[in-house]
Image (cartoon, rainbow, N blue to C red):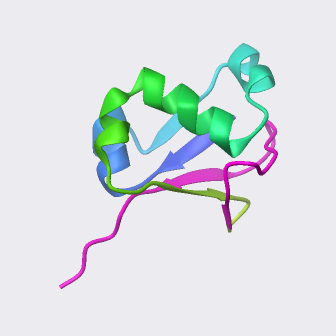
Amino acid sequence: MTILLFGITKDIVGSSTLSMPDAKSVKIKTVGELKSYLASSYPELTRLSSLAVAVNNNYATDDVAINSFDEIALIPPVSGG
């Protein structure tokens, strides 16, 4: 499973993509489980005021099912001016 990272999420992880090992991907079945895994692996993500997840170019709620073939993106809060 590959996760695309943007903005501050890219800075926190240190890369524009994050590859999940297949063993972990199998255990992660929903967006909510993915967010929990990422929060435990990258605690600074929990400090963001919001963190949206897109699955296959659509914003997804925590109960949306995911699999290793989905395109997943973490979308941090956007500041404007």
Quarter the C terminus occupies: bottom left
**Does residue 68 appear to the left or right of 44 in the view shown?**
right
* Residue 80 picture quarter: bottom left
40 above or below 29?
above
Q: x, y percentage for residue 25?
A: 73, 25
Q: x, y percentage for residue 8?
A: 29, 51
24 above or below 29?
above
Q: Residue furthest bottom?
A: 81
Q: x, y percentage for residue 5?
A: 46, 49
Q: How many marks?
A: 0
> Which residue is nearer to you in this view: 4 or 79?
79
Whether residue 11 is visible here, answered yes or no, is: yes
Residue placed at 77% from the left, 48% from the top?
70
Q: x, y percentage for residue 51?
A: 45, 54
Decide whether the magenta segment is chiefly helix, strand or loop: loop
| Residues rendered magenta in the picture | 59-81
